[in-house]
Amino acid sequence: MDRLWAPWRLEYVQGADEQEGCVFCRARDGEDDETLVVHRGDRALVLLNKFPYASGHVMVAPNRHVGEFGELTDEEALEIHRLAERAIAALAETYAPQGYNLGWNLGRIAGAGVLDHVHLHVVPRWAGDTNFMPVLADVKVMPEHLAATREKLAAVWPT
Ligand SMILES: [Zn+2]
């Protein structure tokens, strides 16, 4: 297994506690192109990860600032699930990945960079990229320009 040094991820995880406010709340309250929001639902939103494991790595978060997985309402849980499904459709049309990993990182030890606003990762996968455990261990990073990714996915978002 190749293990690549990814200092930007490390800085991100280390700096997460020092950022002002919450990245998901800033996205909820900000402009799409500045906060890399791909789609806004009624109770949840889809945004690009600024420190992606792969091109097209998106996250689905509830609009509500909630840190406990079990505190999601039924409506939030369903909408997050459905938005993940639509993110997969948009990714399929744009990048034609061969598979996906979907996951919740709950707690710092599990890789969460933001602890108090839960979010679902949707990571597209291709043959020959790293497998899921190294992905979670912060090794593979090869993003195209994030603004370009956001525009592509927003343009094909299923209605
Ligand atoms: Zn928040």
Image: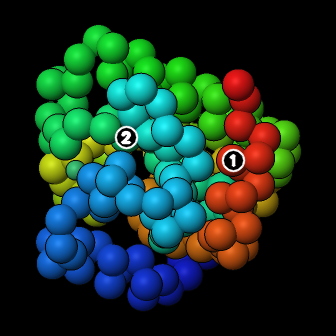
- Residue lying at the far top in this picture: please name it: 74
Quadrant of the image containing the C terminus: top right
Q: Where's residue 79, x and y in %?
A: 44, 21
Quadrant of the image containing the N terminus: bottom right
Q: Residue at x 17, y 24 (%)?
A: 70
Q: Which residue is mark 2?
A: 61
Mark 1 or mark 2, which is nearer the start of the sequence? 2
Write down the quadrant of residue 57 in the picture.
bottom right
Distance CA(mark 2)–CA(mark 1): 16 Å
Q: Which residue is mark 1?
A: 154
The image shows residue 134, relative to residue 4, as above or below, that is: above
Q: Where's residue 64, x and y in %?
A: 23, 36
Image mark for residue 140: none
- Structural crowding at the residue carrying mark 2, measured as other residues with C-alpha within 10 Å and reported as few (<14), some (14–19) or many (≥20): many
Q: Residue at x 39, y 59 (%)?
A: 30
Nearer to us: label 2 or label 1:
1
Where disc 2 sits, the SS reads strand
Q: Is mark 2 within 8 Å of ligand 1?
A: yes
Write down the quadrant of residue 2 in the picture.
bottom right
Where disc 1 sits, the SS reads helix
Q: Can see residue 44?
A: yes
Q: Residue at x 27, y 42 (%)?
A: 118
